[in-house]
Amino acid sequence: MKTTLTALLLLVFSITLTGQEFEKGTIITTHYDTISNVQIKKISEAKSFLHIAYIDIDGIEQEPDIETIKCYTRGEEQFCRIYNSGEMVLAKQVTIGEKLNLYERVYNGNKIYYVEKVYDELIKVPSSSNKFKKVIGDFLNESPQLSEKIKSKELIDIKEIVNLYNEG
């Protein structure tokens, strides 16, 4: 009985995983060509910055070079190319705001965040707490109260900081 139940659960689990393998999305290439309503393969977040595969309208799986992709959406997630320290990198858009955007990238198992003033400068969020308070506090100096809370380490969560800045 236990063996049958285990086998049945394993079968249901396998079918569930297979059913979630692709999600509806849109791809925009670096030449601004738009590929709409495609099924994009659901892969780990870390691999999503390095590889993309989708099913085209003919039902054929395509794997374009990730360097040819400007941005893409997969379900609710959006990945886009950002310019940082002289290179273009693909990052996941975490927050889209009127004043600040927040991006996230997984690199060597670590999450790296980037904050962008809309239509302006983009910086990498330092991982060291001392650098974090100085760099982010100075970067957001247009909001003196928020900047002071960052420098005093009262605020340390970058997602919360970005949301507060966008609200203010």
Image (cartoon, rainbow, N blue to C red):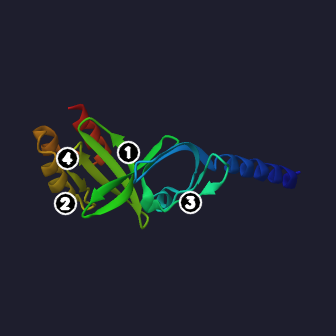
Mark toward the start of the polypeptide (4 vs 2): 4
Mark toward the start of the polypeptide (3 vs 2): 3
Above-or-below relation of 75 to 132: above
The answer to whether the residue labelled 1 contacts the one labelled 4, judged by CB atoms less than 8 Å apart, is no
Above-or-below relation of 115 to 47: above
Q: Where does label 3 land, which residue?
A: 63
Q: Nearer the viewer, residue 129 or 107?
A: 107
- Residue 4 in the image: x percent, y percent? 87, 52
The answer to whether the residue labelled 3 contacts the one labelled 1, judged by CB atoms less than 8 Å apart, is no
Q: Where does label 4 land, which residue?
A: 120
Q: Calculate the distance from the C-alpha at mark 4 to the C-alpha at mark 3.
A: 33 Å
Looking at the rendered image, the disc whose residue lies closer to the viewer, 4 or 2, is 4
Badge 2 element? helix
Q: Calculate the distance from the C-alpha at mark 3 to the C-alpha at mark 1.
A: 25 Å
- Residue 92 in the image: x percent, y percent? 40, 50
Residue 131 badge: 2
Q: Calculate the distance from the C-alpha at mark 3 to the C-alpha at mark 2.
A: 39 Å
Q: Quadrant of the C terminus?
A: top left
Observer able to see residue 76: yes
Q: Nearer the viewer, residue 49 or 150?
A: 49
